[in-house]
Image (cartoon, grey):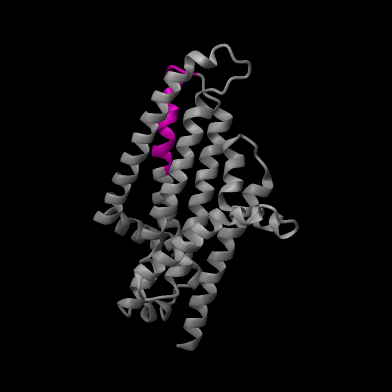
Amino acid sequence: MMGVIAGRELRGLLWSPLAWTLLAVVQAWVAWIFLILLDEFGALQGRLVGLEHAPGVTDLVAAPLFRVAAWCLLILTPLLTMRLFSEERRNRTLDLLLSSPVTITSMVLGKYLAVLVFLLGLNVLVALMPLSLAAGATLDFGKLAAGVLGLSLLAMSFTAVGLYFSTLTAQPAVAAVATLGLLLFLSVIDAASIGRQGAGELFRYLSLFRHYDALLLGLFDSADVAYYLLLSVAFLGLAIRRLHDGRLRD
């Protein structure tokens, strides 16, 4: 049943003009940044020739491109997740959905997977840009794979957060703003760690992009992967609990 729900939601996304418009805008923006980075790398090549352990095209083009793509995901995801459950609540079809024999876990995971598959498709399109340079440049495929992994983990956690907030309100715009607000907070929380001891380490650990930057450097740490997995599981669990409480009240 989870696969049926995921398929229905994914078809709805693929038929949505909003989803395709957002995808086109993000792709155009990322492609423009890619061309700028490529031009800057070409201008720097003369200076890099004489340097020992000089950064390559992966460090100077792929890594910055993935950072830009991550911020694009942060803005895009709330717009894709805001209607998952809030629109059901606004149209008064949520009660009907909750009274069906489908388990709440299947509903949540089905809708979650639909958006995640769409975002992973976007990640593939982004990854193809630096990968296209392999024909004429030497790429560090390990760092490239770590960057793609980090971008995918960000998509997982962003989608889980957005889905949870969509269960709280009947207004999609409110869900989108709340999601964006929390994601931005978690993105800059490490700034509060400056000059702090104890709590500063906690703030640094909670930072979304601190773990992501480590992956972009090619530093694979299971703690970084665990952070995103725990964040995703936590918000999916909260969404299931929220809907389960609603079913009990009904």
Residue 49 appears at what percent x and percent y? 54, 12
Residue 149 versus residue 9: which sits nearer the camera? 149
Q: Main secondary structure of the magenta part?
A: helix
Residue 229 appears at what percent x and percent y? 60, 55
The structure residue drawn at horizontal position 59% and vertical position 20%, both measured from the top left corner, is 54
Q: Is residue 31 above or below residue 152?
A: above
Residue 202 appears at what percent x and percent y? 69, 58
The residue stretch that appears in magenta = 123-137
Is 130 part of what is drawn in magenta?
yes
Is 191 part of what is drawn in magenta?
no
Q: Is residue 17 above or below residue 151?
A: below
Q: Residue furthest top?
A: 50
Q: Is residue 84 above or below residue 246?
A: above
The structure residue drawn at horizontal position 57% and vertical position 32%, both measured from the top left corner, is 143
The structure residue drawn at horizontal position 41% and vertical position 56%, both measured from the top left corner, is 77
Res. 126 image quadrant: top left
* Residue 92 shown left or right of residue 145 in the figure: left
Q: Is residue 111 above or below residue 67?
A: below
Residue 90 versus residue 49: which sits nearer the camera? 49
Q: Quadrant of the C terminus?
A: bottom left
Res. 89 image quadrant: bottom left
Residue 96 appears at what percent x and percent y? 36, 80
